[in-house]
Image: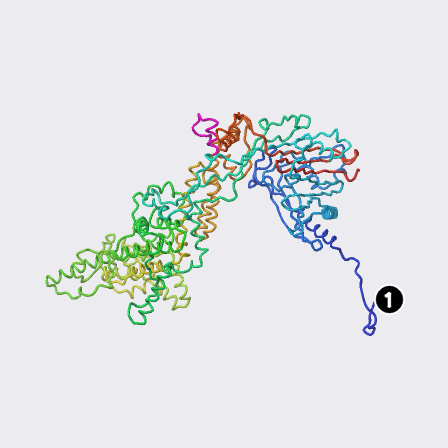
Amino acid sequence: MEDSRSSDYQSPDDSDQVFEITDFTTATDWERFIADFEEVLRNWDTIQPPDAQDASKPKGVIYGLGPIGDHLYYNETVKLKFAKFVLIVSVYCYQGPDVDNKKERLYTGRDTESDLEDTDENIKVFQDLMDFRYNFPNKAHCIYRWFGVKKFAVISPMEDNLITSEDRAKLLLSSAAIAMRNINVYIPVFVQIHHPQRKFFHGILEGSTSRIMFDMIHFRDIPENYRYLSELTKIFREKIASPLREKVSIELSVRFTHIIREWPQEWLLPEPEATEESTDLEERLYSLDKLPMPLIEYSSPSAPIEELHLSTTWPKLSEEFINDSPNHSNLNSMDAQYWSARVLFRDRFTPNLIHSISSLFILEKSTKYADQPLGKFTGLQEEKEIEAKAALDKLAGVGPPTLTLPQFRNFSTWSLSEHLKCQIVDYIFTEPSQANEPINSLLKDYRGFKSCPYNNLTWRLSIIFHQFKDLNTIAYLWIEIVKKLRDHWESMTDLPSLEPDSPNLGTCLLNQKLQMLNCCIQQKRKREAIKAALDTGKKNIKRTGDDNDGEEKDSEDEFFDAVEDENEFEGKQVTTFEGRSHQLNDLTLVNSDEPLFVPITQDPAPMTEDMMVEQVEILAQLGTSSEGAALRARMQSAQLISDMEAFKAANPGAVLEDFVRWHSPRDFITESDEGGESKGQLSARMQTPGNMWREVWESAKPVAVVRQKLLFDYTKEAEKILHSFESLTLAGLVKYLAPCLIHCATSQLCKRLQTIGYSEATFGFNINDLTGYCSTEDFDKCLNILANLETRIIKAESLKRLFTVAHNFYDASEETPNWNTLNPFILGLIQEKEMEISGGSKGYLGRLMITLFTESSQALYEEKTTVGERYSQAYDKSALPKPIAKEYILRSTCPRPSITSKPLPQRMFALITPNEFRVSGAFSQDTLFR
């Protein structure tokens, strides 16, 4: 039997035949777009709203006003291609009001299950259209506000390819309808037409038995005959085109909005001071010696309020009882059921306090010299003269050798005067008279900051530099400060207002280094005092003819930090023991009845954070070999060796057990024998073969503390610190100053926050986040947090001032406004929320709002006109001016397109302002029973 497919086979020898397969299933661009759009709808349809019972979700809905805040819980954008055009498809999902899990049947007149052939999503859209609880959402997509749907997709073109023709829009909408029917996923799809600034949309939702068309009209000017509700109802009935449209009952939601855009000058906060470019430097720093608290100076900006909106809302009305026409209107804002307010602030206004310290960070990032030593900055001519002189000296073979350290020079050409420089340096290095007075009120809650104590040397040094905005002045001032530090070191004078102890590792690195320098100064002063005492003793010995050459040796390498009995320095020769302090608890040595004395030992060497890090790195570089481990143990046991040598010198004949009893009592175990006598022995740890303590004890010699090598070379450490300061860069200086500046700014902002009656918690400010970023040196995030905090504080201060003015006009008999009511209200306004005014026009807040509108209108009129130009105008202080914007929502349920069709929701929204007329409608029709 011959195979029917044999003719399609091409043998190797049959070269004349051509094998070809024609594929008639190739998809067109239109079909590929529909398939891609179907995939997008499938993905989005699986997204579920968050749990309505989740306590973390915002709660509280004002009936008829919409959610307090933005309830957007999902938003995603993808790009699809239609032929050569790239389209952006976005989906938005908003969380609606909490509803019962049972579906509400919106269809009337039918009882069979086949009536609900549309999907659940389609029913949810019908519910959205007829939902009176979310009429006017505060912050949401314009489609949500105008069409009332809470889940929708938007198809918009790229900016270069606008959709301007009706054919293109219909093609996209029909493609979306086909995609919905193919996969049984129903979501309103909108197409953006014309320029994006117009916000002009048409949409469709194609269900299994119904269809919703979303249409819109938009004009710049208001048509003459469509300014009132009476004309809008005619448009709504005509658009429904229902056989029963004259008998259709229309339910209304109405909102009027009154706006204040101009404010009297005396109502605003004080204008900011002159800018730094127009202000002399000495004028900005004139009060350094008069400041009661060294904090960052700033000036309050003018009120950042741009607009104040007062909205009056009727959430649900019946058309039969409302008359709103050119001849008469019974919609009076004073009688509205619900009042709400919202404040719009200027997008750009400067939070001056944070801007003041940010300028130093901006300078560090903007200049290319941030990584160069500050000591190198000088006038160009002076630099050339110095270089020329150095070159000539080198050729002549005279002059001091060239130093690698940057040399500080005289900056005589800079704008910082000698008098001001001296004033600044004296301010920094003067002991504050009332340093501890404001600490409890300012810094008690901010110990998480790793900065420095309030008003000490580091604090004052830090806040000074935020005043300067040019690199030369900063370098000049820093050089003078380092010179002052060196003067303190050379004259052995303590640095003022610093803790006398070892560096506090809980403070910033700059404060630790200054404390370390202070420790070096104190050690140097003690050494010189003891050296002077020894020199005095030697002279006395020579006068009395005491021939003791043992004490005549140079004591340059001796340790003079420990304070011994003065008699031991006055020529008394120690023969058997040295460096005793006191007897330890009446104990005696193990092998004799001699008392056990506590020796005078060297104090542990103080260390800063960077010194600890350096030491850890050195120890880590020794490796894990036996030699490295032994060397590491030797380096770590320097203090132990010193203590053992001092103990042997103070207790001749002592053994390791005696040392352990004093230095580590837990490692000496005491037991009683059968006769009742107590015997002691070393712990198991100390008896382990190769124990380091025993090895060190055997190698230690009896050397009193005054003869030991210094554990802390204060001269080396002081010079290292001063050298690091002399070679410091601008980036390093900003890193040093940043913790204190951020700490200082936080203290001032929190103080202002308490002054206006708010706590950090109510203002949403978490100090732990700030201190965490500061400790990791993420200063940009710190500045952003503080700038946001100061911005909200300025907004709150502006509103409090505004409502104080209104209160004084409304009720001058009461000295202060009712802040218990106003503070939560202001807090919501600064977060740009729409806040409900309880009681409407009859409540306290409502009366204040009326006062603001009426008094501002009168004050502005008097401000803009002279006395002669004014005419007698009676201001009704119990009424509001005409609304600037009117919003209407018309709803109905009726059969469409025929009388046999099932009743479906119809919705139309209208916005009327002086510069805009917009009408958007969602019109449903039955596609099964036409």
Q: Which residues are magenta?
A: 802-818
Q: Is residue 116 rendered magenta in the image?
A: no
Q: Amino acid at mark 1?
A: Asp
Residue 643, position as x, y percentages in the image: 28, 59
Q: Please identify the quadrant where the N terminus is shown.
A: bottom right
Residue lying furthest left in this view?
Answer: 544
Query: Is any part of residue 326 visible from this angle?
Result: yes
Q: Please identify the quadrant where the C terminus is shown.
A: top right
Residue lying furthest right in this view?
Answer: 1
For label 1, the crowd category at 10 Å Cα-Cα, with few meaning under 14, some 14 to 19 and many 20 or more, is few
Name which quarter of the figure residue 321 lies in: top right
> Could you tell me how many numbered marks the image carries?
1
Query: Is any part of residue 611 visible from this angle?
Result: no
Residue 104, position as x, y percentages in the image: 69, 35
The one nearer the camera, 86 or 184, is 86
Residue 734, position as x, y percentages in the image: 41, 54
Left or right: where 919 falls relative to 19: left
Q: Dot 1: what SS?
A: loop
Q: Is residue 807 rendered magenta in the image?
A: yes
Residue lying furthest front in this view?
Answer: 868
Dot 1 corresponds to which residue?
A: 3
Residue 80, position as x, y percentages in the image: 68, 53
The one nearer the camera, 180 or 415, is 415
Left or right: where 14 falls relative to 850: right
- Above or below residue 550? Residue 435 is above
Q: Residue at x 43, y 28 (%)?
A: 815
- Above or below residue 792? Residue 326 is above
The one nearer the camera, 233 or 673, is 233
Name which quarter of the figure residue 607 lies in: bottom left
